[in-house]
Image (cartoon, rainbow, N blue to C red):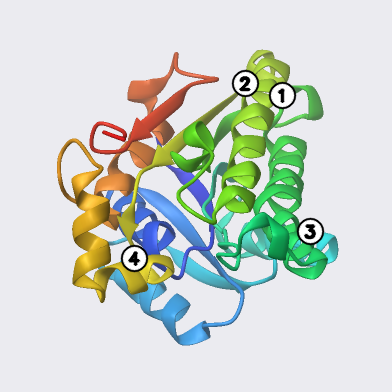
Amino acid sequence: MSGTLLVTGGSRGIGAATCRLAAERGFAVAVNYRDDEDAANEVVEEARARGAAACAVRGDVASEAEVERVFRESEEALGPLKALVNSAGIAGNGAPVAEFRAEVLERLLAVNVLGLQLCCREAVRRMSTRHGGRGGVIVNVSSMAATIGGRAFASDYAASKAAVDVFSQGLAKEVSGDGIRVNVVRPGMTFTDMTTRVKENPKLRERIEASIPMHRIAEADEIARPIVWLLSDEASFVSGAHLDASGGGFLV
């Protein structure tokens, strides 16, 4: 498959790895970012070095107006949307439930759930054969946290990702007849900027690796590969699936 791919959160971590690999596989890549323009432009240059057309598009997925602009500018720069990867996401503040703050929860859900749903809405409007589109693919990045309630003090984050899982399954049923496939990739612990504290804390890293059957933490490229496979024609009959890229899940 080729065409225009929009990756939210494409300037960092799993999103950036997905942009680079998708560029190698023939996609034109729109790299969405919120704050770090330099990082987004670096990913764009890496995509272009792989022979792909690419652009950086600033926008906060928690804002409906900015989501609409991101999709519009991506298509203006690269052509009609064929694929969407929702990789933008944030963690909670690592607090126990008794210390939850409404403003933190609101931002978490605005990015991880509402933002993802708005992006899916815009993709469906463009891709659905019912709306005059030519079909396409959506991959939503969830987390293995959704399956166990998260690690300690991360139940808010886990809940947001569980919402992604359920929404994606419902969306897949709704739009599969309109030429759109929708799938979820659920990473286990992965080295990204969100997990820097794990990488820099040997004792914490050792405890987490001991809880993973493969006894190691994933690299972002190892999550990008199943994402890009789901975008490809090799996965042409796969929709509504939850693909766990987790090193075997959890031992405890």
Distance of label 4 from label 2 (alpha carbons): 27 Å
Other residues around mark 2 within 10 Å, as few (<14) / some (14–19) / many (≥20): some
Which tag, 1 or 4, sits closer to the chain's start? Answer: 4
**Callout 4, which amino acid?**
Ala
Which tag, 3 or 2, sits closer to the chain's start? Answer: 3
Q: In the rendered image, is residue 67 in sight? A: yes
**Callout 3, which amino acid?**
Glu
Q: Position of residue 190 (x, y in %)?
A: 32, 55
Distance of label 1 from label 3 (alpha carbons): 20 Å
Q: Point out which mark residue 68 bears.
A: 3
Which tag, 3 or 4, sits closer to the chain's start? Answer: 4
Foreground residue, 108 or 229? 108
Report if the CB atoms under discs 2 and 1 are less than 8 Å apart. Answer: yes
| Residue topped by disc 1 | 129
Q: Position of residue 103 (x, y in %)?
A: 80, 69
**Callout 2, which amino acid?**
Gly
Q: Position of residue 240 (x, y in %)?
A: 55, 20
**Callout 1, which amino acid?**
Thr
Q: Point out which mark residue 47 bears.
A: 4
